[in-house]
Amino acid sequence: MLLQGKKALIFGIANEKSIAWAIARAFHGQGAELAITYAGEALEKRVRPLAESLNSKAILPCNVTSDDDIKGVFSELGKVWDGVDIIIHSIAFANKDELKGTIINTSREGFANAMDISVYSFLGIMKEAMPMLQGRNAAALTLSYYGAVKVFPSYNVMGVAKAALEASVRYLAEAAGPEGVRVNAISAGPIRTLAASGVNGFTQILNHVEEKAPLRRNVTQEDVARAAVYLCSDMASGVSGEIHYVDGGYNVIGI
Ligand code: NAP
């Protein structure tokens, strides 16, 4: 098994459709031990049974807008694990109002909120995680979208946030590399999830990709999870700072 004995901390499970949930299942199947966070009390009811079904060693609250919550995750985790081998950051948020019309309508508050939850959170988590990650050939992985580099209808401020997230991956890879920590992103094709349902015209994007992508289909959460297993396993021991597309090849198409 590719992740036997690895300890993986996963942020971003909201329900059974979450990409992070597919990653958690794939990691469990490859022998990893899991710790799982949920965004707030209201979500605990949905996430706890999922986490328990994979024998999660810790199930912890973490709203990433709170430094105390992020710190709390690692102080609690330190009671059950002596270190962490894998961090999954699968979190993004923008107000619905920002995900329709054009980027010209973006509010200052909506911009700051999207950047805080979708970008800073990865930096904030890595800052607190480093003492537990260092010296164990650890890996961190976040989720991006092609809207970081090309324009998609209604993606707006989230495209700007994903561009900043992808730049953060490169800076984090450089900062954490000397401690043996690899940092990468998967740029996933469109997948019907709770977060995606907030993007106006999402079905149109799905239909277009299905028609035009080299594989002539949309990817699934499981496609993304299998690539996550590779990137977080020792099979990818020389890979860091990478934005790895799992999109049926859509990004190579010009017209
Ligand atoms: P999802 O199931 O809705 O996951 C998004 C997660 O972000 C949820 O668990 C959500 O928790 C969490 N989150 C939002 N605000 C948070 C906060 N303040 N604190 C902690 N967690 C918070 O949707 P998903 O599609 O799997 O998204 C996961 C990642 O994949 C995101 O980064 C997304 O941009 C990326 N991605 C998705 C697609 C796609 O088409 N679906 C494509 C490329 C990349 P709550 O719902 O409980 O708030």
Image: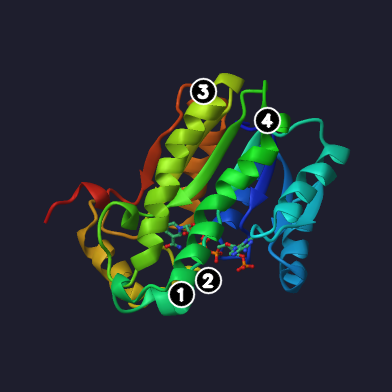
Q: Quadrant of the N terminus?
A: top right
- Residue 237, which numbered label? 3
Residue found at the very far left of the displayed protein = 255
Q: Is residue 6 left or right of residue 151?
A: right
- Residue 197, which numbered label? 1
Dot 2: element? loop
Categorize mark 2 by other alpha carbons within 10 Å: few (<14), some (14-19), many (20+). Answer: few
* Residue under the image location 28 percent in, 70 percent down: 153
Q: Amino acid at mark 3?
A: Ser
Work out whether mark 1 precedes mark 3 in sequence or the reverse, and give the earlier one.
1
Q: Quadrant of the C terminus?
A: bottom left
* Residue under the image location 42 percent in, 74 percent down: 107
Q: How is the image coloured?
A: rainbow
The CA span between labels 1 and 4 is: 34 Å
Residue found at the very far front of the displayed protein = 108
The answer to whether the residue labelled 1 contacts the one labelled 2, judged by CB atoms less than 8 Å apart, is: yes
Residue marked by disc 4: 133
Residue marked by disc 2: 194
Dot 3: element? loop
Categorize mark 3 by other alpha carbons within 10 Å: few (<14), some (14-19), many (20+). Answer: some
